Every structure is written in structure tokens, then in C-alpha cells.
Amino acid sequence: MYHYKFCPLCSERMVKRIPAEGVDERLVCASCGFIWYNNPVPACGVLITDKDGRVLLARRKYPPKEGDWTLPAGFMESHEGPEECAIRETLEETGLAVKLKGILNAYKGGDDPRTKVVLIIYLAEVVSGKLEPGDDASELGYFDLNELPSNIAFRAHVRAIADYRENHHKPCVH
Ligand SMILES: [Zn+2]
């Protein structure tokens, strides 16, 4: 995780403080009182399936976890709400405009080296667009839930896909 060594407001050195029992240790500026809460950052994305029930995954073009697969997703911009973020990230990474159908769930992400994450995944369907990798995706693919790639990045994505498979997926009967 990234940590502040110096205060982003006044440049003095940050020190560790435990403000109260049961609260996380925080970095605090001893000079101006700035507190770095280090809260998890929301990331939003979608779970889209094709007519055969296969799940759309995007391959990561950049570190961390370059070359690994995830659901189309990304970090929320400061002006956005979660639904807007999920729709925007999907369009950027896949070229697809989607309609959100409902929420799959929200997942704790603790293994992204950049920051702590809360991943919110929506169930979505494609409205328009042409499937084409963009932004930080190098490749896209629809995967059978029984033949997923072994290198899925981030536990939150692994959990979301498993959650869908166990609780939402209806196997084809042909
Ligand atoms: Zn300061």
C-alpha cells in the first residue's frame, strides 16, 4: 500500500497515531493535524454473460497483475456514483454500452498493492457497441464458468465470479 511519509498539506513528517480503541492506526501530521484515513477506494464493474452463459473477462494491460484477467471494472472518479462508474469502465475497457440489471454484491479487496478496495459488481446486459479492448485492457474473452483462466487478478474478482456461479448462474439445458 502507498503511505504518506510527509504531510501533503504542510510537508512535515507524518506520525502514527491510534485515535481510539478499535479504530485503525492512522498517519497524522503532528504539525497541522492532517489525518490520513487510508479508507478503501470504491471500484465498480460488471458481470456480463453471452447467450451461452459465458462470462466476459478483460485482460490487464498494465501492472499490477499485468496479463491477468478480471471482470471489466475500475476505480470510481470523484464526481461519479457507482452505477455511472461501472457503465463508464465497461465502455472504456470493452467498447460495450451496457444496461445495469441489478447488483451482484460488494466485495472487500485486500490484495491490490495500490490501495484497499471495495469492489461493487453489477449484473449487466449489452445494449450496443463493438467488443474491442481499450483503456487498460489488452484482450477480452468470454469464458465458460467451468473453464475460467487460472490467472484471475484480485481476490474480490475471484469471489464475485464464484458468487455468480454459485448463486445466479442457471446452467444451460441443451
Ligand atoms: Zn501537516
Image (cartoon, helix red, strand yellow):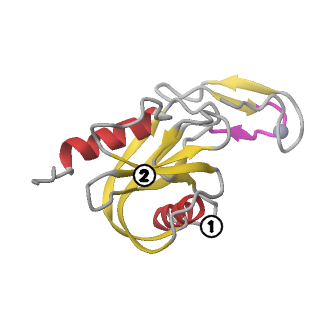
Mark 1 = which residue?
79
The front one of 152 and 83 is: 152
Residue 93 screen position, x and y as percent = 57, 58
Label 2 amino acid?
Answer: Ile
Left or right of 13 in this view: 41: left
Tag 2 secondary structure: strand
Residue 163 numbered tag: none
Residue 23 higher or lower than 163, as above or below: above
Ranked by sequence position, the earlier of labels 2 and 1 is: 1
Residue sitting at x 27%, y 62%: 51
Using a 10 Å C-alpha cutoff, classify the residue at mark 2 as few (fewer than 14 neighbours), some (14 to 19) or many (20 or more): many
Q: Distance between the residues labelled 2 and 1?
A: 17 Å
Looking at the rendered structure, the kind of residue marked 1 is: His
Give me the residue at 64% from left, 61% from top: 78
Query: Which residue is label 2 attached to?
Result: 120
Q: Quadrant of the N terminus?
A: top right
Q: From the viewer's perspective, is residue 57 above or below residue 19? A: below
What segment carries the magenta color? 29-37
- Residue 143, position as x, y percentages in the image: 36, 46
Q: Closer to the camera, 50 or 63?
A: 50
Label count reads 2
- Residue ID at (63%, 60%): 77
